[in-house]
Image (cartoon, helix red, strand yellow):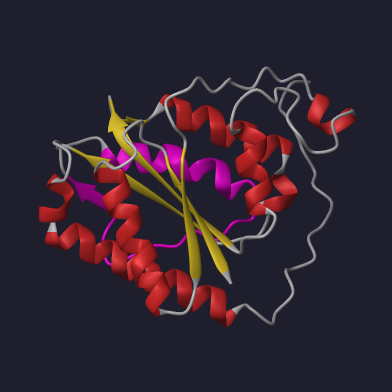
Amino acid sequence: MKLLLINGSPHKNGNTFLALNEIAQALDKEGIASEIVHIGTKPVRGCIACSTCKTKANGKCVFDDDICNEISAKMRDCDGLVVGSPVYYGQPNGTLVSLVQRMLYSAGAYFNGKPVAAVAVCRRGGATAALQTMTMPFQLLNMPLVTSQYWNIVYGRLEGEAALDAEGLQTMRSLAKNMAYLLKATQDHPKPAYEPRQATHFIR
């Protein structure tokens, strides 16, 4: 079993990395491999709703000049996902939001039904709002949300300060244990067979 962790911070080794690395180390003790991927500082396009990924590109985003398709391909061989982000104005990093939206829309088959968790790292406030923003897209793909002993939040402003948040790091370790438990408990069970989706709207 393997888990993919996405560091949605522009700072490769900042507080978001510290939180995700705490999860990765706890997963290793549970016998689960992991990989932390940094989104970097280069631009990531937003989705333009062209639907080319559905009609012509065979599950790949038509924009192949950033990290979207590369990270989506990694999920093909992973059993679960953790997405971490710093909190900016009560929201996740906009680059991460763009990435997640494009990955799930173009390559949703690689994500569907796999356990997922979101982690917010903040100076003081806005973390719960950022967590809600991060988790909502995954709920559209039948992805079980993995929780912990507290909301998945770590506190720290300056680089490295997250290491001082003892409760936050413990929350990350508990998250990892819950993720490992869910992965192991469902390892030999096939995913549910879902009904064909019925998409409705309210314009008559």
Position of 179 with respect to 61 (left or right) is left
Q: In the displayed structure, would residue 21 be above or below residue 31?
A: above
Q: Position of residue 45 (x, y in %)?
A: 58, 20
Residue 189 percent across, percent down from the top left? 70, 79
Q: Residue at x 37, y 43 (%)?
A: 131
Q: Give yes or no for residue 59 being in the magenta stretch.
A: no
* Residue drawn at 77 percent across, 19 percent down: 50
The image quarter in which residue 23 lies: bottom left
Q: Position of residue 126 (x, y in %)?
A: 25, 35
Q: Is residue 155 above or below residue 173?
A: above
Residue at horizontal 31 percent and vertical 34 percent from the top? 11
> On the image, which quarter does residue 30 sit in?
bottom left
Q: Is residue 138 magenta?
A: yes
At x 73%, y 29%, the residue is: 61
Residue interval drawn in magenta: 127-155
Q: Which quadrant of the figure contains the N terminus?
A: bottom right
Q: On the picture, is 74 further left or further right than 129?
A: right
Q: In the image, is 204 to the left or to the right of 88?
A: right
Q: Is residue 181 above or below residue 172?
A: below
Asked whether the viewer can see residue 171, the reply is: yes
